[in-house]
Amino acid sequence: MSQLMIVSMLVFFGLTVPIAVSIGLGAMAGVSAANLPSLVVAQQLYAALDKYPLVAIPFFILAGNLMEAGGISERMVEFAKSLVGGVQGGLAMACVVTCMIFAAVAGSSVATTFAVGAILIPAMVRHGYPAPFAASLQATAAELGVIIPPSIPMILFAVSTDTSTGELFIAGVVPGILIAGALMAYVWLYARRNGLGLEDGEGRLALWPAFKRAWLALLMPAIILGGIYGGIFTPTEASVVAVVYAVVVGMLIYRRISFSTLSATLHRSVVSTATIMFIIANAGVFGFLLNRAGVPDALGQWLAQVFSDKVSFLLGVNAALFVIGMFIETSASIVVLAPLLLPVAVAFGIDPVHFGIIMVINLALGMITPPFGVNLFAAGSIARVPLERLIRPLLPFVGTVVACLLLITYVPQLSLALRDLVYR
């Protein structure tokens, strides 16, 4: 049964059937092969979505879209430019800093790509940066949207594996800062080597005026993360707080959101939410059938035979996830693979939270690697650059993130030290 399900799913992938539908059709093939009643499908579709932490997903998506519509992201960009825009390559570095700040509310890399890229990609091109470089940088920096908390993929991992969402969130802080710092270092070297960014300081505000314009926008991530780790509200409740804050600031203070704008923003958020939830629901059925067939135990035994220690296991899993992430959407990969791989990782003595961070960062690379890199397509559409022209400037960025991933993989305290300080 499990072989039929997996083969069917891969065949539908090859036929370019949408990912969620491919997973669902593969699950239906498994139900038929096992002679199970069709009622099982309905039960498991409901069970996959009947989880309280999933409530955070639509609200974080909506919060990100409201930030873009309400001018909050624009003020974040101005503040980031005031921090680093004065050095050579500062405008490109401001792209990374803005993505870090925006990520602390939105939780979505695609939302980060559009919200920040719509402002900074044209600005970088006007300052002489090649459009393919600007698009590749934006696509890569937007990955921070799923690494720095709050993060929708982390919520999915937590729900799929019964891991603490709060612990995953705080474990992503240091890895996110590490990756951001590495990207900024590469951007600075690139600008120095190619003589770019010499006039990046033109038109930027001084730090204090930029802060005064952006303080309400900057207060938003402080309220969200401070509320979560201060014990005031849960990560799920924080998503609702983010939406309320974005509506109040965008409509009543910045006055950038009208009722017509709000309607369009709600529509866009509903479509994005429905896409993710449809994947989760179908993956839930698929995972239920794999568990029923004993696949997790069989996979665990096979991996234990193939890999003799933790070091080789982590290397093998990273290589496999990198390839999988190139072809399968991040949310689908997590809800299908996390329940299968985590028990094996725990058997090798790997902390579940550390493994979750590794998995999220690795699969996030799939958002910037062809053929299905959603961030890449989004940034390319903003820059009006075809995908094939993005490959060459993208390679150093991918290499930078991979180097950080290996460091995070084999130095677990980068992920766990802050977690242990807060939760232990």
Image (cartoon, helix red, strand yellow):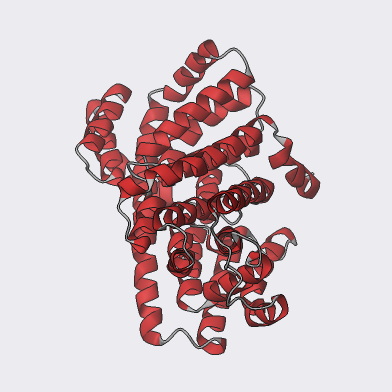
- Quadrant, the C terminus: top right
Residue that extends furthest to the left in the rendered view of this protein: 15
- Quadrant, the N terminus: top left
Residue 330 visible, this angle? no
The residue located at (69%, 47%) in the rendering is 174
Residue 309 visible, this angle? yes
Q: Is residue 162 left or right of residue 136?
A: right
Q: Is residue 203 left or right of residue 21?
A: right
Q: Is residue 47 above or below residue 76?
A: above
Q: Hey, which quadrant is residue 221 in on the image?
A: bottom right
The residue located at (45%, 18%) in the rendering is 298
Towards the viewer: 324 or 42: 324
Residue 203 is situated, as x and y percent measured from the top left of the image, at 58, 77
Towards the viewer: 258 or 396: 396
Q: Is residue 266 left or right of residue 57?
A: left
The residue located at (52%, 37%) in the rendering is 399
Residue 100 is situated, as x and y percent measured from the top left of the image, at 60, 59
Q: Is residue 384 left or right of residue 78?
A: left
Q: Is residue 237 above or below residue 423?
A: below
Towards the viewer: 109 or 82: 82
How many labels were placed on the picture?
A: 0
Residue 147 is situated, as x and y percent measured from the top left of the image, at 57, 49
Q: Is residue 385 above or below residue 307?
A: below
Residue 313 is situated, as x and y percent measured from the top left of the image, at 57, 21
The residue located at (47%, 59%) in the rendering is 129
Q: Hey, which quadrant is residue 265 in on the image?
A: bottom left
